[in-house]
Image: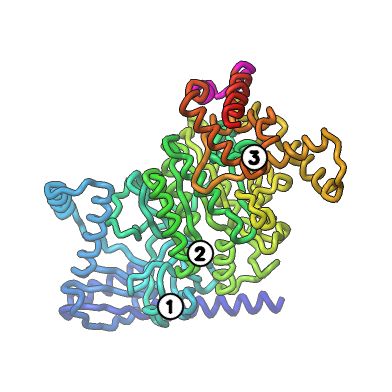
Amino acid sequence: MTQAITDHAQDLRNTGNSRDLLQHAELVYVTAPSDEQLAGIRKFLAKEFHNEEIEISLKEDASLKSGFILRVGTKEYDWSEQGRIEQLKSAVTKKISGINFSEENIISILKSNIEDFELEAKSKEIGIVNWVGDGIVNVDGIDHACYGEIVIFDCGIKGMVQDVRRDEIGVILFGRDTEIHEGSRVVRTGKMAGIPVGENFKGRIVNALGAPIDGLGEIAADGYRPIENPAPSIVDRKSVSVPLETGILSIDSMFPIGRGQRELIIGDRQTGKTSIVMDTILNQKGKDVICVYVAIGQKASTIAKFVNNLKKGDAMDYTIIVSATASDPASLQYIAPYSGTALAEYFMYQGKDVLIVYDDLSKHAVAYRAISLLLERSPGREAYPGDVFYLHSRLLERSSRLTTEAGGGSITALPIIETQAGDVSAYIPTNVISITDGQIYLESELFNAGQRPAVNVGLSVSRVGGAAQTKATKKAAGSIRIDLAQYREMEVFTQFSSDLDENTKKQLDHGRSLMELLKQPLGRPFSMAEQVITLVAANAHIFSDLPIGEVKKFRMDLLKDFESNHSDLISQIESSKNLDDDTREAIVEVCNQFKNQER
């Protein structure tokens, strides 16, 4: 009852404030209006606001050039020359986006725009800043703003509506708040947050708003997409069946990733998570897959090093980098993955396959937590807001493989999560594990023991499995996971035993050679045929009796021999994507011959 009375009193106060605002209008001019013009303005106000007693105060402002601006309450009517210039500038900018620049083009666009241009004196909803701090602004007077709408402050900085309250709105800034203060004016744009998209973004580095930051000039966009978009419906989705090869033997053989899948990469810091992603991007060369790498909350030097490695591998031609560094505001780190997904969706709906990497979503959740706490939302578990699960689910659900009718493309997502001391049961890791279709778990102990990539075979899983594997890889992999599991178990039991029977020794040697084969040099992804040859040779115990230190070198020499002298076998595997008994026997025979020659 008390709450109802309080709410009613607040409503009366709000109504009173609105009524007071509508009792007064401000007319900003260059040349003072005549009595006849003032009478016309009073008539307009009486008709528009159903109030004939509105007082008009006059204010001179030479910056308008000519004409005048009328402000009533939270609305603004602009009939000034400056307003006309701004509208014309906006119309021309909209028209030239995505057009090849030439002198004739620019002149013809300007002519047509100037001839067709008419000043629109539509009312604009204006708000006033009542509080600003830490990249968050509270605004009074904007009563009809939508969640996610872009607003512009009088200093030119953009913001996004993130909180819609009874008597004010909360806005997150996409820039520094040094020029914004109490009393600054804010204008609604009526547009939802979006990002320019297009073919020309390939090979470029952009910020979370789609603006280039690589110093290579402006990017001609082909269109504009909202950063928040509904995920494809069940009807528009297709089952995952086409492999997206990472080039990493331990992943492609045991935890295959398919186009349209979401596979989580999880582990402590400095366990090689980004290295797996880099090898995967390098391996997409020539496979008609566009890659989008979203860097969230990382050092600019780390991103520069990553880009440099991609350039060395000629991978930047088909890659887009979306960067929101640790020095960027939390608001830009928050929208970066959504902006990257909007870019990926542009290509997906054109029927193309896209790989998107979010590096990493732990920092994304921290940025969102900072924004939510500053907006005074209630903290929950680990101080995260209650909707932190929705934060990532609405992002990752946009990755899928579309039916031909819906466009036929796909987005494969590789989100990265950083754990603390291997704790996969923390809030954010468990959330993202439940959203994704499997996880590759990287272990610090394995990494420090020299196992690179440090994939834990027991805790890693792909919920798509063999459906996203070529028949050749599936047949060649055989029982590799079981063999490794048996080796790990047997190694524990036999580490203090001196007297072992022959079968146990063979099994231990086979397991050790497999572990050694799963070690892979950085920046050297293996082709599908190379993986098949390695797995067939391993299952035929070609590597088992070799000294551990020689296994990796022997494998590389063997693959070179296949490439030089037996390229027909490689071509057959690549073209048929199958492994029949004759091909398997031929591979084993070549391996044995090479082994005898080496010895």
Comparing 58 with 191, the one in front is 191
User: Disc 1 designates what residue?
Assistant: 129
User: In the rendered image of this protein, does residue 300 appear above or below residue 518?
Assistant: below
Q: How is the image coloured?
A: rainbow
- Percent of width and height locating residue 390: 61, 56
Q: Which residue sits at x=61%, y=56%?
A: 271
The first of marks 2 and 3 along the sequence is 3
User: Disc 3 designates what residue?
Assistant: 255
Q: Is residue 251 visible in this depiction of the protein?
A: no
SS category of the residue bearing label 1: strand
Identity, as a three-letter code, of the amino acid under mark 2: Gly
Dot 2 surroundings within 10 Å: few (below 14), some, or many (20 or more)?
many
- Disc 1 versus disc 2: nearer the observer: 2
Identity, as a three-letter code, of the amino acid under mark 1: Val
User: In the rendered image of this protein, does residue 45 appear above or below residue 113?
Assistant: below
Comparing 53 with 75, the one in front is 75
Q: Which residue sits at x=66%, y=30%?
A: 542
The Cα atoms of the two marked residues, 2 and 3, are separated by 28 Å
The answer to whether marks 1 and 2 mark residues whose Cβ atoms lie closer than 8 Å is: no
Comparing 147 with 551, the one in front is 551
Comparing 222 with 333, the one in front is 333
The N terminus lies in quadrant: bottom right
Identity, as a three-letter code, of the amino acid under mark 3: Phe
| Magenta span contains residue 166 | no
Residue range in magenta is: 571-582
- Disc 2 versus disc 3: nearer the observer: 3
- Percent of width and height locating residue 354: 47, 41
Q: Which residue sits at x=60%, y=61%?
A: 269
- Disc 1 versus disc 3: nearer the observer: 3
User: Disc 2 designates what residue?
Assistant: 297
- Percent of width and height locating residue 316: 39, 47
